Image (cartoon, grey):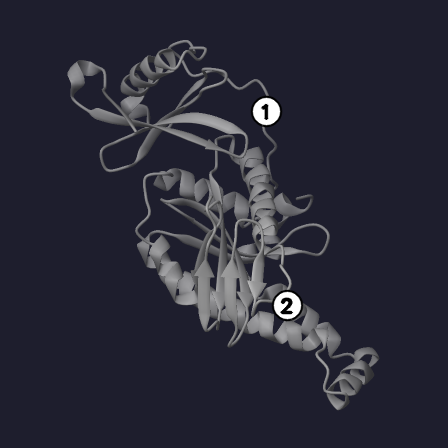
Amino acid sequence: MLRAGSGRGGLVELKVTRWKRYGHDRLYANLPDGTAVGWADVTTGDITVLVAEHRDDVIAVLTHHLREISAPVSPQEPASRTEARPVLPPLMPADDLSANRPGEAIRDLLDKSGHESHLLERVVSRLLRRPSKWDSWRKGLAGEKRVGGELNRLERHGWRVLHSIPLSERVDVDHLLIGPGGVFSINTKHHHDKAVWVGDDAVKVNHGKPAPYVRKSRAEAKRVVRVLEQYCGFPVPVEPVLVFVGVTDLKVVATQLSVRVYQERQVAALAPLSGVLTAEQVEQIYSVARHRQAWSRA
């Protein structure tokens, strides 16, 4: 972590932290309480001020640190963005994802599977006592409901929660958590009474074949970043999260920790995180994320 006094006679001390993820290389200027007030692109030297009150301090301290690491330095004004970002249409009730319940996409699948065309398949599966896709759907729904309930508790700490965000190719983001500590793309896995081992790129359930949960979670987070930054016009850090439901044991041996891993009750650990997004940014991201049309081509 780099430290430097700000401008205006050093009345405010800003802490500067370097952040490298998803192909970005940035310096963030934060207040002592961790609130981000500006950032700089190390590659281009462009500076973005997030809180106008600290404009001079942000420009001074970030310019100083850009020079220290020999990166191109921006002018004293934040670079103007020549590309107009896309604008979403007015939010209509049919496009408002905030009304989605946990597991909404799975509920739709189960409702459709109740038709007579699927009834015979379900009966045969039960008679032969073999697992069916309906059993998998029901288990998945139970897991998403439990995790969704835990996440909804975080709203009293200033977080926004969305469930079952539909992407293209008939997949969805199980849960999206947006708040002062950033954005978290949450993938729920229900393995009742099973032991789970998590490595850097794979997960094993009861010592079985490796499953690509970790890689898929990272890829999902990158899709979320592309959508949110496209419409917000500022950097949106998104961290992937894997939440395991009903497991008897969870062992994490990952070394890079690029994906957070929890059991369902442990997601409360996200509540105190702060200093990444301002309250205004949280609301702007939420207004984009809740709009179905933002995700139509994700």
Q: Is residue 212 above or below residue 63?
A: below
Determine whether, in the image, residue 73 is placed left or right of residue 218.
left
Residue drawn at (73%, 79%) of the image:
114
Sequence-earlier tag: 2 or 1 = 1
Residue 210 seen in the current view: yes
Give the residue drawn at x 80%, y 78%: 118
What crowding class fits label 2: few (fewer than 14 Cα within 10 Å), some (14-19), or many (20 or more)?
many
Relative to 94, say whether 179 is above or below.
Answer: above
Instruction: Identify the residue under disc 2.
Output: 106
Badge 1 is on which residue? 84
Mark 2 element type: helix
Q: In x, y percent, where is residue 38?
A: 36, 26
Residue count near mark 1 (Cα–Cα under 10 Å), binned few <14, some 14–19, many ≥20: few
Residue at image location 62% in from the left, 59% down from the top: 210
- The image quadrant that residue 7 belongs to is top left
Residue 204 figure quarter: bottom right
Quadrant (top left/top right/bottom left/bottom right) for the N terminus: top left
Residue 218 is situated, as x and y percent measured from the top left of the image, at 56, 46
